[in-house]
Image (cartoon, helix red, strand yellow):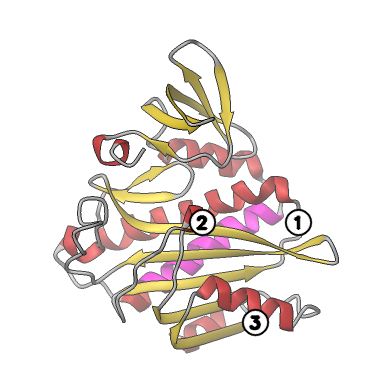
Amino acid sequence: MKEWLAKNSFFENILYAKKIDSTNEWAKRYFFSNKSCNVNTLFLADKQTAGKGRFSRAWLCAANKQINMSILIYPKIINSNYLQLMCLCAALAVYYTIESLTNLQCEVKWPNDILINNRKVCGILCETLFYNNNLKAIIVGIGINVYNNRFNEAISKKATSIFLESKKIISKNALIICLLENFNFYYKKFNLAQFDDIINEYRSICTTLNKKIQFKRANKIINAVAIDITPLGELVVKTSSGEIIILNHEEIFYNSIYNKEV
């Protein structure tokens, strides 16, 4: 895989660790110690001891059973308004990677959870990096459950893996290579400001649309229907009272598993 990455990837720098606290934290440390670098860098680890997802939730990691990666990029269009779009690019890349290599049917739960049979197989966490008060880079963290054959009781009803769903051993290297090819494809679209193309493609695979959902606002649970995705990747919902609301960072719930978490 190393040879393939060197020849085919847009990454000029590829770093690997057997064990790390978090690939996103590793990428942050690298950025702040190499502020003038401006080189797209890929961080890969066999195991994370302190992986995290959205809302600072722990992302549990078993050694050598998952893909743990972070992508440090310096987009040509660097604006915090477009961070959500980068998350959608990552979701598209993961979705097509899993479907093409496993034939499993995935769902994309807005904004970037990848589900199989209503259970989460992949989490994506995008973070911005500032230097001298200027947005300088973006980290795209991607965690995919690949070989896991069981999960602890706390998450067993809401987590799954490619192995559990397919009953097949799919090469992690093949998944990583395909994922990076797909990510590069959408990253190029992002840098060319082809935002409408990204949004339209995302709309076509986002299973949240037209679903009844719930979200929390001001400590109240609000019932709504997801009706659209904005040009910036936000979710447009219509509440049970008829109000149109745009969600940006809120967490949404739309089945019995997630409703129990509200």
- 15 sits left or right of 106 in the view: right
* Within-10-Å neighbours for mark 2: few <14, some 14–19, many 20+: many
User: Residue 230, position in %: x, y?
Assistant: 60, 32
Looking at the rendered structure, the secondary structure element under dot 1 is: loop
Q: Residue furthest front?
A: 219
| Residue 158 included in the magenta stretch of the image | no
* Within-10-Å neighbours for mark 3: few <14, some 14–19, many 20+: few
Badge 2 is on which residue?
90
- Distance (Cα) linking label 2 and label 1: 16 Å
Rendered residue at 20%/66% (across/down): 163
Give the number of the mark in front: 1 or 3.
Answer: 1
User: Residue 259, position in %: x, y?
Assistant: 31, 35
Q: Is residue 91 above or below residue 67?
A: above
> Quadrant of residue 218 in the image?
top right
Looking at the rendered structure, the secondary structure element under dot 3 is: loop
Badge 3 is on which residue?
12
- The residue range painted magenta reads 175-191
| Residue 183 included in the magenta stretch of the image | yes
Sooner in the amino-acid sequence: mark 1 or mark 3:
3
Amino acid type indicated by mark 2: Ala
User: Residue 85, position in %: x, y?
Assistant: 61, 47
Pick the quarter of the image with the C terminus.
top left
Amino acid type indicated by mark 1: Ile
- Distance (Cα) linking label 3 and label 2: 19 Å
Badge 1 is on which residue?
78
Sooner in the amino-acid sequence: mark 2 or mark 1:
1
User: Residue 47, position in %: x, y?
Assistant: 38, 80
